[in-house]
Image (cartoon, rainbow, N blue to C red):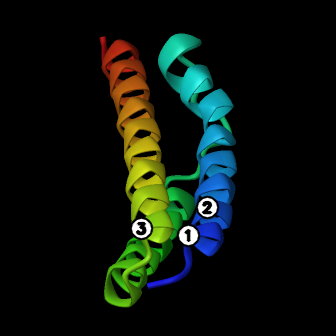
Amino acid sequence: MAEAWIEAIGLVGGLIGILAWIPQIRRVWVDGKEEGISIPTFIAVSVSLSLWLVYGIIVGSIAMIISNILTLSFIIGITIGVYRIRLKRNEASES
């Protein structure tokens, strides 16, 4: 396990990375806009984050574990929001 100051740097970096997703979540869930969001890209990012999470668990890095779990939660939330919007749009166009 890394020293506390190293984990603190990781936690700050992870927090900044998590905060970077807030505008995207707002755009999807509050504004109801999903244009320009690539689901394949979000899937690739999710796989990458999952692997980093596994790595963090193996090396015992609390910063990596927390950051990757929270970021994955945001990515999953955005993806669900995009699917919800696209499903409603498709249902409306079929009517």
Tell me what residue is drawn at x 56 percent, y 79 percent.
Answer: 3
Q: Secondary structure at mark 3?
A: helix
Three-letter amino acid code of the residue under disc 2: Ala
**In the shown orientation, is residue 22 left or right of residue 84?**
right
Q: CA distance from mark 1 to mark 2?
A: 6 Å
Residue type at mark 3 is Ile
Residue at image location 50% in from the left, 62% down from the top = 40
The numbered mark, 3 or 2, whose residue comes first in the sequence reads 2
At label 3, counting other C-alpha atoms closer than 10 Å, the crowd grade (few under 14, some 14-19, many 20 or more) is some
Which of the image's four quarters has the C terminus?
top left
Disc 1 marks a residue whose amino acid type is Ala
Which residue shows up at 55% across the image and 70% down it? Answer: 4
Mark 1 closeness class: few <14, some 14–19, many ≥20 residues within 10 Å: few
Q: Are marks 1 and 2 in contact (CB under 8 Å)?
A: yes
- Quadrant in the picture for residue 81: top left
Q: Looking at the picture, how far across and down is residue 7, in whole percent?
A: 57, 69
Residue 64, x across and y down, in percent: 48, 69
- Give the distance between the C-alpha atoms of the residues marked 3 and 1, in whole angstroms: 10 Å
Q: Which residue is mark 1?
A: 4
Which element type, helix, strand or loop, lies under badge 2?
A: helix
**Which of the two residues, 71 or 40, is positioned nearer the viewer here?**
71
Q: How far across and down, in percent of the image, does residue 57 sit? A: 33, 80
Residue 62 is labelled as: 3
Q: Is residue 35 above or below residue 50?
A: above
